[in-house]
Amino acid sequence: MSGSHVSLGSVINAVAKSKLFGKSKIAAKMLYRMKHVSLRPLTITYNNILNACAFSDPGLENRKEILDLAMLMLKEAQETCGANFITYGTCLRVIGTFEEDPATRWRLVRDTFRCCCADGQLNKLVMNQVKFAVSTSQYSLLTQEAKDEKTGQLRESFTRNCRKRPLSPRSLMKN
């Protein structure tokens, strides 16, 4: 990884965690700067921008712009470096926070949830964000869709690409 890549990625992360007004737009501009100098963004780069969206102030910022940016970042991540459960979970958080129309929120959550399942990235974090974003009955419908009828657990095919537990420095040394 080049020094420029690390530097721009670090700036995007810092902006995402800041209290800056318009931080999601600033982070997205940094992403496009990264691309302009021929650096390929990583999944974590998109996750940081989604995080900036998720923790923007819905009372102060333009809800539609934040939501549109988040959906664009999800799409770009899926098409380039790949979306992971953090990408999906954070995007679901943005939808739950910024989409005011219940019918549109339901459609966006359901579609994002189904993409997550198809990518094998479903886990408890994602399910918690689904629960945050939709009504109890809608959550129940998606839970039924996600569960294996025999085991009552999340379908293995929906969770196949999730890291089961975080890598620790000790587990890295064993390899």
Image (tube, helix red, strand yellow):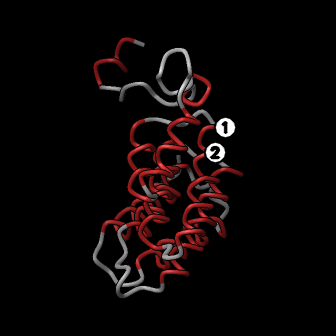
Amino acid on which disc 1 is placed: Ala
168 shown above or below 104:
above
Kindly indicate the quadrant of the structure image that contains residue 145. top right
Q: Which mark is residue 27?
A: none
Residue 158 appears at what percent x and percent y?
59, 31
Residue 35 image-quadrant placement = bottom right
Q: Secondary structure at mark 2?
A: helix
What residue does disc 1 label? Answer: 118
Along the line of sight, the residue nearer the viewer: 104 or 32: 104
Name which residue type carries label 2.
Answer: Arg
Q: Which residue is mark 2?
A: 114
Q: Is residue 1 visible?
A: yes
Q: Please give left or right for residue 49 compared with residue 78 in the image.
A: left
Crowding at mark 1 (Cα within 10 Å: few <14, some 14-19, many 20+): some
- Quadrant containing the C terminus is top left
Residue at the image point whose x is 40% and y is 37% from the top: 124
